[in-house]
Amino acid sequence: MAAGFMILAGRTRRLLLASAALVPGLAMAQTSDSSTDTTPPVINVHIGVSPLGGGVPLQKWPTAVQSFSAQDLTKQGAADFTGALARQAAGVNLQNSQANPYQPSVLYHGYELSPIQGTPAGLSVYVNGARFNTPFGDLALWSVLPDDAIDSFDLVDGNPVFGLNALGGAIDVKMKNGFTAPGGVLELQGGSFGTVEGHLEYGKQVGNAAAYVDISAARNTGWRDAQGSDIKSAYADLGWRGSAAALHINLIAGNSGLHGPGTVPVEVLAADPNAQFTGPNSINDKYLRLSSTLDLQLSRDTSLQAVLYYENIWEHLLNGNGPSDLPCGDGQNLCQGGAGGSYSTAAGGGIIPQYLPNGNNAYGQLNLNTTNTNGYGASAQITHKGALGQLVAGLSYDGGYSTYGAAAYDGALSPSTRDYYALPGTGLGYPVDEPGNVPVNVGLRNAYYGLYATDTIDLTKKLSLTLGGRFNIAQIALHNERGYDPNAAPGGLNGSHYYQHFNPSVGMAYALTRAVTLYGSWSVQNAAPTPAELSCASPLDSCALANFMSGDPALKQIVSQNFQAGLRGTFVVGGLNFLSIQADVYDDETRDDIEFLQSPYNPQGNGYFSNIGSVHRRGGDLAAQFDSAKWHLYASYSRVQATYGASFIERSNSPNADASGNITVNSGDFLPGVPKNLIKFGADYKITPRWSVGFSGTAQTGSYLYGDAANLDKPLPGYALIDLNTRYSVTPHLTLFGSIDNVTDQRYYVYGTYSSVGGVYVAQAPNYSNPRSYSIGAPVAVTAGMKLTF
């Protein structure tokens, strides 16, 4: 798969340049015997084969790995984890349905991982060896991850050892500590859209003990209406290490308030690019994690690694929408969907009256959702180097208990901004309790068990074989804590589910030369349905994308098969210059894939999760990178072809839907949101030892809109972006930096779907009729800042 060359983007690039002093001596020796070998010295780079480590030399590993350091995160100023993936990681693109810069969905070779409910997770994430995907929905809450405290992270392909959801790969994050990041840093940054960011970090080692702390905050108003963000995070690590052991205890705390105007019909965007469609749209997250890691050397060849963690996640969501309850036509009451529908009812069964005199367009609805999750887990593994190679064997447990509450309220939308408001005397509005839209209060418990092993064996001096596998068990139980509701779907929210699967892997790596490795592998991964998916699997009682829940039908687990082959190499080019290359291809197939489909029974786009058959993801990556004392250059091209392997019918607001509002998806149709072509490139140049300048560029072709899985409409337009950056060291301890993002002020779109039209009055475009809706990307933005080290 993708871009093992990116190993040089971080820690390996520094190793190569640090070892450059060895190269002239090697070159002189080669001259004396007329040798023309230009291979670099062997750099002993190890990659973690599991969340707990157990490093194997990269030259012997049979899958692609992309590695990034803290330096890569700060290319455009303040550390930006998802920004580094977007600018530098081959095969990665971002989608942003909420239109908030801190809430992107990350897609890698067509596998998606999102902070928003409604997208089955195709990637797993680990932080310091502990699972970061949330227990409730396998989400990745990027906004609470302290980017400034990240020391490095790897994007790993085709390794089932990384557990559930590693269908397309895993992201393995390692945080800083007092041993690896001594000293202090104060960084301040400000710029466009009211951006103000700052962080303070300090690390200190005293003998065998060390401590590290990072405190950061960011605030901005955004480039669109109702798009502000307010984020605070902290990270701390206490560590001890001796001759045969190391122990770390660390804490992550985060608090984020994010507002996203979301997608807007294209005719409204044309009239007012800053507008929201309906509001409010806000998500507040509070996150706390306490974890401990242990590394114990049992003997010269055997070691033990272990992790223990506890986390609490609290999320509160407000989502203002157009109405699902409208006047019946009798002048007195509201009906579901308007005239001809059943009476709209409130809690207790009372009929909701017609409370507005101004027709249908002024009505609105507020969805309110609250989730409180306690997550916990432990993992342990043994690493042994012996006659049978390097063996890693371990077991893991990840559990969680979540309480979830949801309710909908009928009110009104303001005429200018279309923000929801409640009528006086109704509290949050008229509480809705009707078929297809019932209040929810449910408890959910999940337990994931894993038993895994992987062994890398040297068959010859050049050929290595890696065998591995993981046995996964998932148990999920739901309990309705609200009691009987006659409006709820049959079956209710009570149930238990059990899944198990064994995921094998085999791969080989062959050293064609000291500089070039050829590799290939086959692996199987699986993903069990999450509590959120299992609780929203009925079209009869659908749920809102942002967390509603309903009945409890069973879903099948997703199982993927992955084939990949590639070649990577590093060469010396003229003395102290290094060129690395990567070329690879992959072919994946997932069975019983899960998608969030729009319900045919709800006019506001509520939906449900369903198995939709197989999905094929095929493609390749081609990448190159050049490093010298003054230059750092990189470029990559990725081809991603993600298609459905089975036919199914989906409801859609697409203008190409049939008279019943349905579209037929056929085998071979392309997945929405996945561009077929991705190009990334960049350069950094040291003008003087103190002053550097650089740029990065990304380009991607169009992708089909979400809601157009049948590929009946024109795609979301592709785009190309150029970002500039510069740094100047005033003193050895003071650095000034600046950046310009989207320097050409390109208008582009980061998400596309369809909205229902006609139910919401928009003053800027009163006659809008096109259901195509886009989330617009950021215009040109300028930031500047300073970094003080001490």
Image: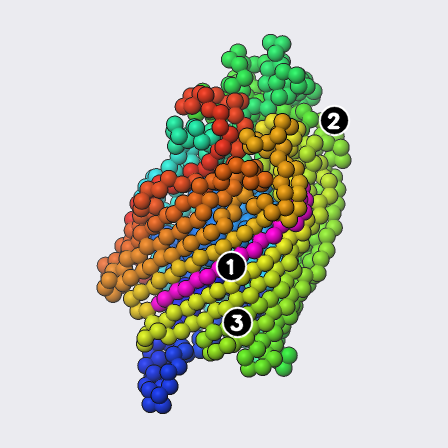
Between marks 2 and 1 in the image, the one whose residue lies nearer the viewer? 1
Q: Secondary structure at mark 3?
A: strand
Residue 539 magenta-highlighted: no
The answer for how far apart the CA atoms under marks 2 and 3 are is 62 Å
Label 3 or label 1, whichever comes before in sequence order: 3
Left or right of 588: which side holds 758? left
Secondary structure beneath dot 1 equals strand
Q: Specify whether 10 is left or right of 307.
A: left
Residue occupied by mark 3: 518
Answer with left or right where residue 124 lies relative to residue 180: right
Depth order, front residue of 743/142:
743
Residue 243: image location, x then y, percent: 51, 76
Judge from the rendering whether residue 71 lies leftward or rightward of residue 120; answer left or right. Answer: left
Callout 3: few (<14), some (14-19), or many (20+) C-alpha neighbours within 10 Å?
Answer: many
- Give neighbour class at mark 2: few <14, some 14-19, many 20+ (Cα, 10 Å): few
Disc 2 vs disc 1: Cβ atoms closer than 8 Å?
no
- Residue assigned mark 1: 620
Mark 1 Cα-neighbour bin, 10 Å: few <14, some 14–19, many ≥20: many
Identify which amino acid the numbered label 1 is placed on.
Gly
For disc 2, the marked residue is 486
Q: Which residues are magenta?
A: 610-627
| First along the sequence among labels 2 and 3 | 2
Between 115 and 402, which is closer to the camera in this rendering?
115
Q: Quadrant of residue 601?
A: top right
